[in-house]
Amino acid sequence: MDRISRKELKSDRFQERVGSTVEYLDEHRRQVILIGGIALAVLLVGWGAYWYSGRQKVVRQQALTQALDIQNSAVGPPSGNPLVKTFPTADARREEATKAFQQIINDHSNSEEATIARYYLGVIAAEAGKEADAAKHLQEVAEAGRNPYSSLAQFALAQLYQGQGKTTEAEKLLRALIDRPSMLVSKEQATIALAKVIAPKNPAEARKLLEPLRTERSAVSRTALTALSEIPAQ
């Protein structure tokens, strides 16, 4: 809209423009009210969607917290404290945790919380010796492309493959993690794991990977030194 000067405010031309606008609004009052109502409805729907989205996020996080509480519960006799949940056996805890994590996936399948739930289903299956189920769940998370959970699933999957003797598959995953570390799987962590995988067939490369880590921060250096001590002599 062009800028209006004080001089123009006093002119007949401006009065004509104002008059025509008033006439237009009067003649199209119902249309203007309708358009205004639609705009308000759009704003309200947008706000409602935002509120609902935020509310759903809280619901998902509460469900995930409850599932993690089950997963981290103690195994043994009742503590006597109603706030401290215990299970008589590890199998009973796994069964209850599996139900809780699966429910999150059923209710919120495409959410970040469902991705985390799938990861824990893989961990639980691995603990129970159900390697095929563990690989299935972890592969789903690894392929989801949601860092850092996908990287964590890749790391767990590499450990599973190593235990199954699938060293080629484990090595491939770990090398990829070294190239693309995340906040949950560091480059150093992936490097040490890779060295352990390849040590039996390629001890020279394993040592080459570990040597630079001897001078890293204390936790990394200690782990690297331990891994170096476990490499078979050539």
Image (cartoon, grey):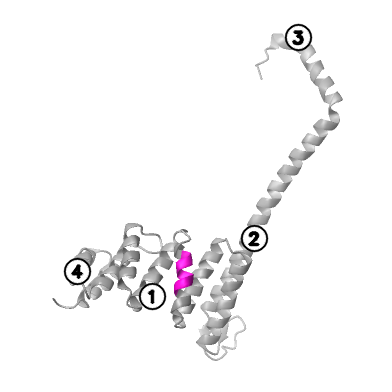
Q: Who's the residue at 55% across and 77% down the image?
A: 98
Measured Cα–Cα span from mark 3 to mark 4: 88 Å
Query: Closer to the N terminus: mark 4 or mark 1?
Result: 1
Identify the residue position indicated by label 4 in the image.
207
Q: Amino acid at mark 1?
A: Leu
Measured Cα–Cα span from mark 2 to mark 4: 49 Å
Q: Amino acid at mark 2?
A: Gln
Residue 137's place in the image compared with 10, above or below, is: below
Q: Amino acid at mark 3?
A: Arg
Eye-nearest disc, 4 or 1: 1
Tell which residue pokes out farthest to the bottom in this image: 77
Q: Main secondary structure of the magenta part?
A: helix
Q: Secondary structure at mark 2?
A: helix
On-image quarter of the C terminus:
bottom left
Eye-nearest disc, 3 or 1: 1
Magenta segment range? 135-141
